[in-house]
Amino acid sequence: MRTFGNIIWFLFGGAIMGLAWVLFGILAFISIVGIPWGRSCFVIAGFSFFPFGKEAIYRDELTRAEDIGTGSLGFIGNALWFIFAGVWLALGHVASAVACFVTIIGIPFALQHLKLAVISLAPIGQTIVDKDVAAMARYKHGKFKL
Amino acid sequence: MINSHKFTLAGCLAILLWSTIVGLIRNVAEQLGPIGGAAMIYTVSSVFLLIFLGAPKLKSFPPRYLLIGGGLFVSYEICLSLALGMANDRTQAIEMGVINYLWPSLTVLLAVFISDKPVNKLLYPAIALSFFGVAWTVGGDDGISISQLTSNIATNPASYSMAFFGAFIWALYCNITKKLANGMNGITWFFIGTAIALWIKYLISNEPTMEFTTEATFDLLLAGIVMGSGYALWNIGIIGGNMVFLATLSYFTPILSTFFSAMILDIELTTKFWEGVVMVTIASLICWWLTREKSHKNGAVNANVES
């Protein structure tokens, strides 16, 4: 089911949005000063190519340890990211979500685009894991609902 | 001809929208709670229906329709939404959705009992197949195993009971409201009634206060609008659409609903699960086929909005 969802997703817009993330990642690496953001871009590009069965989670939620991306430096990084790349990627995902919503059969994909739009705004400090791993981490840390 | 296609398209969109509702209700219930989430969804849908369909004066409805039809509608919606919301996990929520789709077969069975007319004997095995399909789905990986079925149901008897009784209630609703309605459509009032009943239940329950995050609010609006749009579009579809086509399509709702729910909730379903869903769908189609001359204008979802 997830494989099927991922294939459909990839063919109908996921590949384009994933490539957009890869492009921003390459630009970040080329700029040298953007290397810290580049790594996040490639992690989220993978998620953007095949989102079903995966989930974004803050690394401190997963490991219970703060690192450079989840601390105050990460906050500054996210603020800069938001201005230069995040807002544009988020708009791209929102536009894709609207297009999916209109088709009705695309509603499940629209919801994935919206998740990606939220991640696009502040990706530093987040990582992508299997849904089960994310649920287990949240359960262990008492953030699991239902 | 073009107009007819427009109406048929509206009906198709309504069926697709309804197919997403199991996943969307569960999504909201996970964030706002089973009772509070359902109350909010029906409130949003009621507002949506009030704006787009309006609400005829209550005095214009036959009192028996309002009381009996309304009572059955409200009971069914509460059973379904709470069964989905109170399910132990997402897979179980989709199981509730499949149990709910016993209602097309049960509707035919009840119609046979009520009308007392001779029917094709194949109808009974078809109805048995729909129950078998549900048991196949709920049984898990072992297929039909009484002990496995019992232990699965024992994990959440309240939800399973509500889903099961909901199917019976809806079958009853489909059979009696057409006669009581007198051509009137009280769907907006019924939605308002469902919302009020759920709010009362929420107030007397111990459910924690709802936390409205951006995601929860968005999902709530989406679920409410999708549900309201489904009914509004169906009302358009039945005006001049190809009802035979829409009826046939509507019988595939269990498959569509399971597919969309699995995608929205991002879960893997086993082959056994799908086999059970297909059995329920085939059973509903056979029931409809065997009785089509009498009720070919009544699609599986037509009864949702008696025209």
Image (tube, coloured by chain):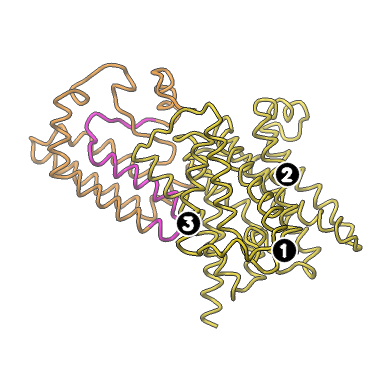
How far, Cα to Cα, is label 3 from label 1? Answer: 31 Å
Is B64 displayed left or right of A13 in the figure?
right
Q: Amino acid at mark 1?
A: Lys
Q: Amino acid at mark 2?
A: Gly
Q: State which region is magenta.
A: A100-129
The answer to whether residue A19 is above or below residue B294 is above
Q: What residue appears at the point 22 percent right and 32 percent down from the top-left corner?
A: A124
Disc 3 chain ID = A
* Front one among B185 and A116: B185
Q: What residue appears at the point 63 percent right and 48 percent down from the top-left corner?
A: B74
Q: What residue appears at the point 61 percent right and 51 percent down from the top-left corner?
A: B255
Question: Which quadrant does the C terminus of chain B fall into?
Answer: bottom right
Q: Which chain is orange?
A: A
Q: Indicate the quadrant where residue A143 lies.
A: top left
Q: Position of residue A115 (x, y in %)?
A: 34, 42
* Disc 1 secondary structure class: helix
The answer, for residue B282, to whether it is visible in the render is: no
In the drawing, what numbered circle is on residue B94? none
Q: Position of residue A145 (x, y in %)?
A: 45, 27
Is B6 displayed left or right of B275 in the figure?
left
The residue at which mark 3 appears reads as A105
The residue at which mark 1 appears reads as B178
